[in-house]
Image (tube, rainbow, N blue to C red):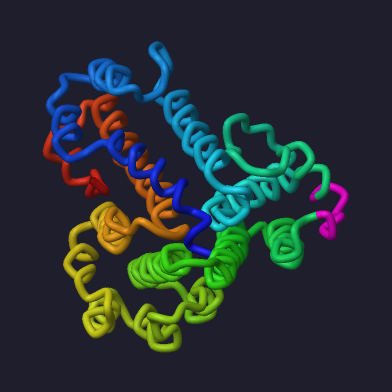
Amino acid sequence: MSNQYIFAVARIRKKELELLNGDFMEQLLAAPGEEECLQLLYEKGYGNVGQTANELFEEEERRTWSLIGELVPDVKVFDVFRLQNEYHNLKAAIKETCTAGTHPGIYLNGSADPQDLEKILLERDFRKLPEPMQEPAARAMEVLLTLRDGQMCDCIIDRAALDSIRETAKASEGEILPLYGELTVAAADIKIAVRSAKTGKSPEFIKQALAECSTLDLTRLSQVAGAGLEEVISYLKNTEYADCAEEIRKSTAALERWCDNLLIRRIRPQLHNPFGIDPLAAYILARRIESKSLRMILTGKRNGFDEEEIRGRIRETYV
């Protein structure tokens, strides 16, 4: 199977030269404001001159998937990367349908037209949804309509998204896609445990929110989440995620950054892998995390944040 990607990997090697490195991130941090940052990005070939920040990121995402579409016979091999958007849109459509709301800009790029999604939910024709979404969508709508419990609605859909990511990733070829699935779910479970410990969530809520993964003992994690933050930290120190303990004590933003940096470190060896689908998957992830850092910088500049405060939020670069 690896031979079919030799040409694709060669193309990706060239595109990796265009990825933003730490030195360029420092240039952005040193820029006086958002407009100056955007100008530096335009000069780097990022987006199109005159685009707003949001337009720029949409353009770069389009370019990434356009490139991947040229390199592989079927981009569905990377569907796992699109699942978070798909479930976000499902959750948004449920809330729009149940509250008769009209909130422009709530949907992300996804395979389903939002109006079609809302029509399916309005008519309760759940069979038209992808099979993994059918039962969670029905339960989430029932909870929102009968109990008016938006948090439980979110919990049901978020858990379904994590389950779908993990199962799809496990069935994928190569090493990076299954790794992405495992780390995504583990990171989400850690954040759920931390949040639950801080807010005193019930054991029932924690159990429903946590998604199965191979690298965490969910029975133990749910127990310590109910016992308090220090118990969560103590448990994690005995797992492969021990390094996140101090980040948890710092802030939620520090924990988020740690999770992304862990993924970057685990995929970075693909820079030297000439074969297979893994370098392509790593490139997609590198682009996504790169965009996340850029959003942090631009948002920080727009809101007048201190340079050091912004620096503490940006992620490690792939190159």
Image-quadrant location for residue 295: top left
Q: Is residue 209 left or right of residue 94?
A: left
In this view, 106 is above or below 50 = below
Query: Could you tell me which residue is drawn at 40 percent across and 50 percent down?
Result: 285
Q: In front: 102, or 311?
A: 311
Image-quadrant location for residue 40: top left
- Location of residue 151 in the rendering, given as x and y in whole percent from the top left corner: 56, 59
Query: Hey, which residue is sitting farthest top in the picture?
Result: 50
In this view, 61 is above or below 193 = above
Q: Which residues are magenta?
A: 121-128
Label count reads 0
- Location of residue 57 in the rendering, given as x and y in whole percent from the top left corner: 43, 30
Image-quadrant location for residue 182: bottom left
Residue 17 in sight from this viewpoint: yes
The majority secondary structure of the magenta stretch comes to: helix
Query: Could you tell me which residue is drawn at 87 percent across and 49 percent down?
Result: 123
Q: Is residue 172 left or right of residue 274?
A: right
Q: Is residue 302 magenta?
A: no
Query: Could you tell me which residue is drawn at 47 percent across and 63 percent down?
Result: 177
Query: Could you tell me which residue is drawn at 58 percent across and 31 percent down?
Result: 105
Q: In front: 139, or 254?
A: 254
Q: Is residue 277 left or right of residue 92?
A: left
- Location of residue 158 in the rendering, given as x and y in whole percent from the top left corner: 56, 61
- Location of residue 59 in the rendering, given as x and y in whole percent from the top left corner: 48, 27
